[in-house]
Each structure stands twice: as C-alpha cells, then as structure tokens.
Image: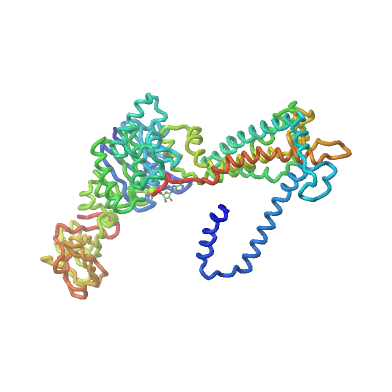
Amino acid sequence: MADLALRDLVKTYDKTQVLHGINLDVQDGEFVVFVGPSGCGKSTTLRLIAGLEEVTSGGIEIGGRVVNNLEPKHRNIAMVFQNYAIYPHMTVRKNIGFGLRSSSAPRAEKDKRIREVAELLGMTDLLDRKPDQLSGGQRQRVAIGRAMVRDPAVFLFDEPLSNLDAQLRTQMRLEIKKLHQRVGSTIIFVTHDQVEAMTMADRIVIMKDGHIQQVGTPSEVYHTPANTFVAQFIGAPAMNMLPGQAVENGAILLKTGDLVKADLPVGTGRQVTLGVRPEDLTDAAAEPFLEGQVALREPLGHETLIYVTTEMGEFIAKADGRRPPEVGATVRLGAEQENLHIFDAETGSALA
Amino acid sequence: MAVAEQIRPTTDALLKTGGPKRPANMGQYVRWALLFLGGILMVMPIAYMISTSLKWPHEIYNLKLIPEEPTIENYTFVLEDGRFYWWFLNSIIIALITTICNVLFDSLVGYTLCKFRFPGRYIIFIAILSTLMIPTEMLVIPWYLMSQQFGWLDSYWGIMFPGLMTAFGTFLMKQFFETVPDDFIEAARIDGLNELQIWWTVAMPLVKPALAALAIFVFLGNWTAFIWPLIVTNSVEMYTLPVGLSSFGDEADVAWELIMTGAAISTIPTLIVFLIFQRFIIRGVVMAGLKG
Ligand SMILES: Nc1ncnc2c1ncn2[C@@H]1O[C@H](COP(=O)(O)OP(=O)(O)O)[C@@H](O)[C@H]1O
Ligand SMILES: [Mg+2]
C-alpha cells in the first residue's frame, strides 16, 4: 500500500498533446475514480502510472518514490484491463498465479497465496478451468485475482466493467468496493460511466480533453460542480442549463423575462448560466420561474420525470409519482434557492 | 450389409430435409466438375508414383495405372541399398533442424516487428519482404561461393544455412502476432516477465495454429528441396533424399521405378508431419481470454 502523486504530468504522442499537466495526490488506501468522456486521457494517465507509456514531462511518485524511469514490474502496481487480458491457454490457477512467476517464493507459498485469492473471490472450484469455460463475470474475477495475488501497492483498473451486462456490472461494482474495504489498497479506477464513479469512489477526478476539471468526493462534485462540464457530466438526467443575466439584488433575469431569486456575487449585467438539476426542478415550487407544456412523462415509481417545452427549449423536471401533470398540461417550474447552480456564461466556471 | 444399413438412414434423412428437391443449378454443376478435375489432377501423380513403384522396368513406359505384373522387388531393392538410409537420415535431420529454427527465429523476428515500435522497423520489414522476390536459382551462386569460402561445402550446415530463417515465415508470423492483443503483452509486462518470457509463454501459445502451418510448410519445403542440396553436396553420403533418388540409374538410363519407389517411401514422413500438426491448425486460436 502506498500513496500516489502525479506532478504536472504531460503526455504527447508524436505532435498531439493528450495530457496537459495533471496534478493529483492520492492518499494511501484511497479509492479514486477517473471519469470523463471517451478520449479525454483517462487510459493514458493510467498507462503512465503503470509504466506502459513514457512520461513526456512531469513526475509520478508511488510511496514517495519517483518511478518515472522504473519498469512496470518495479513499480509495485497491478492493472486490470478492460478486456481482462487473461490467457486463454492457461487455467484459472495459472492465470491467477501468473503474477507470481517472477517471484522467488517457494512453490508451496505461491500455491497458498493463489488459494487465498481464489477463496476471497469465491473461485476455489474453478481453479482448474480454462477461461473459455467461464462466464464474463468469472473472467473478470480471474483478472482481478491475478492483480491481487502480488499484493501490489496500487491497483489500476481500466474500465473493467464495461464488457459486462448491466446486472453483472452492478454486482461487480459492489464486489470491487467490498474487496477494497477488505484489502485496503490504493485503487485508481477508470470509467466513462458517472454512476460507477459516484457509487464507488472516495474521490472522483473528472477529466476532459486532457485536463482535470474537478477533484472531489462524490457529494462535492454533485452538489458543488466546479463548472458547467462537471455539472452536466455528473448526474442523470443531466442538469438543466438556463441562460440568463445578473440583475439587482443578486437575482437572475431569464430570457423569458422571468426573475429568479438568487445570491449572485457578481455585478449586474453579467451573462450567467443557471443550472438546475431535474430532481430539484419541480412543478410544486413556492416561487416558480419557468412556464411550459408537458411534452413527455417518464414514470419512475416514486416520482415522474416530465419533459417540459418552454420558450427557451426543453427542460426536465420532477413531478409527483402518484399524480403527475397530464401531457399537454401547462406547468410552472421552480427550485429552492439553495439548489441553484450559477456559472459564468463565458468561462463556464461556477459563480455560486 | 451392415455398412449399407448404417448409411441408408442418413441418406434418407438427407433426401427428406431437402423437401421437394430443388434441381441443382448450372453454377453448381460447373463447381462440382471443376472440383472433380482438380481432385484428379492432384491424385494422378501420386497414383502414378505408386503404380510405377510396383512395376518392372520393362513396363514403365506403359502408362497403364494397374501394373500387369505387380512386384515389390523395387521396394526390397531400395530398402536393401544402404545409401537410401543415409539419404533418409540426412533429409530427416536437415528438415527437422530447419523446421525448428524457422519456427523459433521467424516468430521471434515476426513478433519483434509486430509488437515493438523502433526506428527503422518498417524498412527492416520491407527489406525482409523484398527477399521474397529473389528466386532460389539466382541465390545459389552466391550461396555456393559463400559456402566455399567458409568451407561449408558438402556439410549439413552448408545444406541448411540458407533456409534457417525465411522471409515468408517471418511475414506469416508477423501477421499472426497482430491477432494477439497488446493487453496480453502489457499485462505480462506488469506482472514482471521479461520480453523473451512474454514472447515464449504468452504470445507463442496463442499463435500455435500459425506455428503448425509454418512447421508444415518448412518441413515439406526442405524435405523436397532439390537444387541447393544437389549443388552443395558432393559425396554420396551427404545427399538428401531427393538428390539421392535422382542419382538412381546411370547416364544412359534413369531408373524411374526406383526413383518412384524412393519417392513413395519418402512421402511417409511428410504424412506424419502433416497428421501431427494439422490438429493444431484445425483447433484454431481460441481468444476466450478476451471479453465475455
Ligand atoms: N498510442 C497513441 N498514439 C496516438 N494517440 C493516442 C494513443 N493513445 C491514445 N491516443 C490519443 O490520446 C487521447 C486520449 O486517449 P485515452 O487516454 O485512451 O482516452 P480515454 O481512455 O479517456 O478514452 C485520445 O485522443 C487518443 O486518440
Ligand atoms: Mg480508455
């Protein structure tokens, strides 16, 4: 186990720069999830940490030691790949034990370690099978077992669940989380799925185009997104974004002429974007500021999502699960002041 | 009887599944005819080889397939001639060593060209490929001069050295290693294997079908090689089987019946090699380690 630090990490392929100075400190035993759209540089970051790619500039420290020039095998890390990368010509036992090949421990000790790991993953009965006799979830477990067997300081996971079906994904999510609680190692987990990030992470790192957008606990990135990108990336359905302008008393004047009460810390006249999550925008607000017609209803049981067409476009809001407004009905939507997110219209950064 | 009964249900079933039988169209007849012709073309030389090996010398130029007075005299003659064993042994040793070397070196070079990025990689690959365009007939003179300078004439090494690695094999293996996902290699790298171990324990088992195909090609190629072994060998004990067989008879009269007998016997190892390795080819690559 060890902490991990990334210092101004830059990666350039040929002439295109894909990482533009990544800075991050990961505590010992922390579960950190990198999340972001495809192509934002998550895998590249992970591969740099693993030593599969060379750093263009900047530094990587594992357990206080700069590892930039160390071979992957000397970094004391293990990696689980999206495609599992377990060897089809080897049994589960051999696959799990693969990481011990280069260790000089006696055979009996290695066998014991393999059995321990298999037990932890509930795979004891499958040790003599070949991968083609395993289900997707079992293969995934073998891949995790192979990573665990060496007891590395840092685990790296690159979208390990994206090849599983939805149900299995939820289950494996839990299992990995439990595993982390049991073995307590540092984990860097990469995903493009914000639900995975929210449910698994101690801290989330949100990336876009090779830049870190925000680092924070799931609650922090959800409740206080640093910018419009984070605001819309985290949470589903995505946050509603309403263009407006700052006016007197910190209020916001929407394009429709409606006034929204807020605590804007900026001068009047500034163009802003008002963000409201669908779950905060309701047809039962005390002071509604948006009027429109219900175009579509999505019953979720305890509540109903309504898609409301307004002068400014379509927005998603929440309505009562039992008595939602009819399609075509006119509704007036509003939100509690504390649930409003306000961003600078130009830069997208959060203002309040 | 029993056989006929075993067959009947299947043919019946076959006829039934077709329902009202659709007449085969013209294209199908043409296809069958071509396949049939091809089949005959393939089998005829072998049939004549065996037929000739069972004939007396006076019957050889009579092209009937069934010998009038079949004899195994030729076989006893060839097998009692001590030289045949020498040639057989030479051929086996040369073909085996060459096959092993090709399987190792071609795949090592193919793997390197496929999985490593280094300057000049592409040029090296093109250079290797371009040697495919030079026919053996053009190469034997430089090979001969080289062998002469190094004192390799009339030795195993002299016979083998030009074929220990082949451009074709390197190309074949490079293409097959493309099917081995990089993740496999990187996972092994993280697990602490060195590059040679990765090649041997991870990549090689995954391209077994290609290795088997290569082994068959190389073995057959060397087993039947004629021009170079003929040129580089002088003494009768160093002959390979094809060279030795062609030496049966004298200037005036080629002993076809003996050549055919030797050839018939010499197909046995090729059959064995094929039977051993085709298993791997048919079994195919199982990429079950990937995805679900
Ligand atoms: N080997 C490579 N050569 C050139 N560009 C690459 C290479 N690997 C990744 N990239 C580029 O780097 C960017 C980030 O890729 P990646 O880290 O794989 O994204 P992610 O994992 O977040 O989807 C992408 O634009 C991708 O095209
Ligand atoms: Mg990726």
Q: Quadrant of residue A339?
A: bottom left
Furthest residue in direction left, as rendered? A286
Can residue A280 be seen here? The reply is yes
User: In the visual, does B35 lie left or right of B279?
Assistant: right
Of residues A11 and A62, the one nearer the viewer is: A62
> Is residue B62 placed above or below B192 in the rendered structure?
below
Q: How many labels does the image show?
A: 0
**Residue A296, image x, y percentages:** 24, 70
Coordinates of residue A106 in the picture (x, y in percent):
37, 24
Residue B140 showing in the rendered view: no
Q: Is residue B139 left or right of residue A63?
A: right
Residues B217 and A319: in front is B217
* Res A239 quadrant in image: bottom left
Residue at point 76% right, 50% down? Answer: B65
Query: Does residue A24 sit above or below A164 in this rendering?
Result: above
Question: If the image is split into quadrants, where does the N terminus of chain A sit?
Answer: top left
The answer to whether residue A111 is left or right of residue B241 is left
Residue drawn at 62 percent across, 39 percent down: B272
Asked which quadrant contains residue A59, the reply is: top left
Residue A26, image x, y percentages: 28, 38
Q: In this view, does A342 lie to the left or right of A210?
A: left
Name the foreground residue: A77 vs A20: A77
